[in-house]
Amino acid sequence: MLPVERSSAGAGQHTGQRTLVIFGASGDLSSRLLLPGLGSLLAGPRATSVRIIGTGRSPLAPDEWTGRVRSAFESHGEIGQVAADTLATTEYVAGDPTDVEHLRALLELAGPAPVLYFSLPPAVTTAIVEKLRELELPEGTELAFEKPFGTDAESAAALNQLVGSLVPEENVHRVDHFLGRTAVLNLIGLRFANRLFEPVWNAEHIESIEIVYDETLGLEGRAQYYDNAGALVDMIQSHLLLVLALLAMDAPATMDAVEVRSEMARALRSTHLYRGSAIEAGRRARYAAGIADDRVVPSYADEAGVDAERGTETLAEVTVEVDTNRWAGVPFTLRSGKALGVARKEIVVKFKPLRHLPSGLNGARDGETLRIGLNPGELSLSVPALGVDGPYTMGQVFLDATLPSSSVLPYGEVLSGILRGDPLLSVRGDVAERCWEIVEPVLAAWRAGEVPLDEYDAGSAGPATWK
Ligand code: NDP
C-alpha cells in the first residue's frame, strides 16, 4: 500500500508517492505542457516521487512511451534522480478510455488515492466521468480537468454536479496554468506583504486597471480548437478573470485553499460588465494578412480549418467593474489577441493624479503607473518627480525590478498542488461557473451580431479605430 499521509493542517494533503494517470497521454497538451511541467517539478527542490501511467487509444510501445516522457522531462534541462526514478517506473496502457472495463483495470493498476488527469477533448472527459460513476473510486482519488470547463455556465454547472457525485470538491482540480505562473503568484506578495501598495489599492486612488495578454503568434495550426473558442473564451473567460480575482480580492486570513479561493470567488461574484452593457463593454476584431514577428501571417479567414463565416474574433477586449466598496467605478479592462505587433503581457495599474499641485509647478500632472509583467515577470513603477525638464517641472521617473523567476514551470506548479492534494491553485467549481456568467452576455451580443467584428492587420497594434 502506498503511504498516504494527512497533513496537520487537516486539508487531506498527501506527502507520499502518488500515481498520476494521464488520459490522452499521446496528445499535444501532455507532451508539450503537462510532462515538461512535471519534469521541471521533479528536477527542483520540491521533487517528490511520482508514478505515471499514461493511457489512450494509441498503441504506444513501452520504449516509445518512456522515450516521450524522457524527452518531455529533458526539454526543461537535466533530469535528476527523482525524475530518473519516475522514468524507471512509468508505463503506458492502451485502451478506450470510455470503456468501463479499461477504467476498472486502470484503477486497479494505479492503487490507492490516484490522481486522474483528463488531458482530453472535453466531451470525451465528460463521457469518462459518466462511466466512472459505475465504479467505486478509491478513497482520496483526485480528478484534474483541463480547460475549458464546460462551454457555458449551464454546462459547467452540470459538469460540476456530475463530478461532485464522484469526489468531494477539494479533490477536484480545474486546471488553469496561469495560477501557476510565478508572476501571477507574485501578485499575492506584492499586494498583501508590503506596506506601499495595499493601502492605496482601491477606487480612492486607482483610476483604471488593464490586464493585457497580446501575442505575436497567429493561429499556429490550432483552428479546430480556436475557431470554436475565439479570444474571449480562450483567454478572458478563464485566465484573465482569474488574474483579476487575485488583483481585486481582499486579503485572505491564511494562504490556504479555503481562504484564498473564497476571497477570489467573492471578488468574482461582485464582477459585472462595466456599466452593465453587453454591447458597450466589449470589442472584438479579427486579423487580416500582415507581418507579425518578422513572419508573413495570412488573414485569419484564410487559415486552414477556419470557417470564416463563423466570425471568430482573434482579439477581444472586455471591460468589467468589481462592484464592492473597494472598487466600485474602477474599470478593469481585459484584453487578449493574436498576431499583434507587440507581445504585450502585463497588468497596468493607473493611479489617479493628485487633486492638487502647488502652483508654480509646471508640466503634466499624471499619477503613478504600476506595470506588472505577466511574462516575463517585470515590475515598473513610474512616479511623478521634479526636475525632469527643469527644477520646477513635473515628469515621470521609473523604478524597475525583475521579479524572481522559478525553475518550476506553471504546469509543474499546478501539478505540485494536485499531487499533494492541495486545491489552492485549482479553480473552484462555483468560480468556473461564475467566469462563464460574467462573459456570457458579451458572447451572446457578439453571436447575435450586435457588436461589429473589426479588422486589424497582423503585426499591428489592433484596429486603427481602437484607441
Ligand atoms: P488532443 O486533441 O491532442 O487530444 C488528446 C488525446 O485525446 C489524443 O491524443 C487522443 O489520444 C485522445 N482523444 C482524442 N479524441 C478522442 C476520442 N474521441 N475518444 C477518446 N480519446 C480521444 O488534445 P490536447 O492534448 O491538445 O488537449 C487536451 C485538453 O487540454 C483539451 O481539453 C484542451 O482543451 C486542453 N488544453 C489544451 C492546450 C494545448 O495547448 N494543447 C492548452 C490548454 C488546454 P488517443 O488517440 O491516443 O486516444
Image: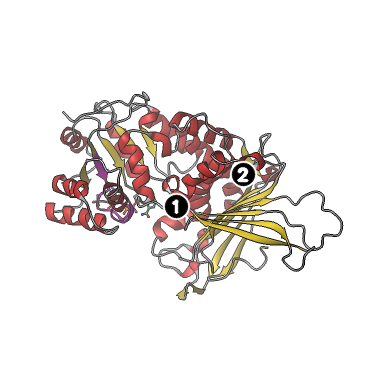
Q: Amino acid at mark 2?
A: Phe
Q: Which quarter of the figure has residue 134?
A: top left
**Per the image, is 136 magenta?**
no
Please name whichever residue, 181 or 154, is drawn nearer the observer in this view of the structure.
181
- Left or right of 31? Residue 172 is right
Q: Which residues are magenta?
A: 20-33
- Estimate the x, y position of residue 263 in percent, counting from the top left: 54, 33
- Mark 2, Cα crowd under 10 Å, few <14 / some 14-19 / many 20+, is few
Say which of 410 and 26 sits in front: 410
The amino acid beneath tag 1 is Pro
Residue at 42% of width from left, 35% of height from top? Answer: 424
Determine crowd level at label 1: few under 14, some 14-19, many 20+ residues with C-alpha closer than 10 A.
Answer: few
Circle 1: element type: loop
Label count reads 2
Tell me the tag on residue 224. Answer: none
Please provide percent x and percent y for residue 114.
25, 34
Q: Which residue is mark 1?
A: 404
**Taking 413 as reference, is 363 above or below it?**
below
User: Is 86 situated left or right of 144 in this image?
Assistant: left
Expressed as whole percent of the image width and height from the top left, the position of residue 11 reads 37, 26
- Label 2, on which residue? 197
The N terminus lies in quadrant:
top left
Q: Is mark 2 within 8 Å of ligand 1?
A: no
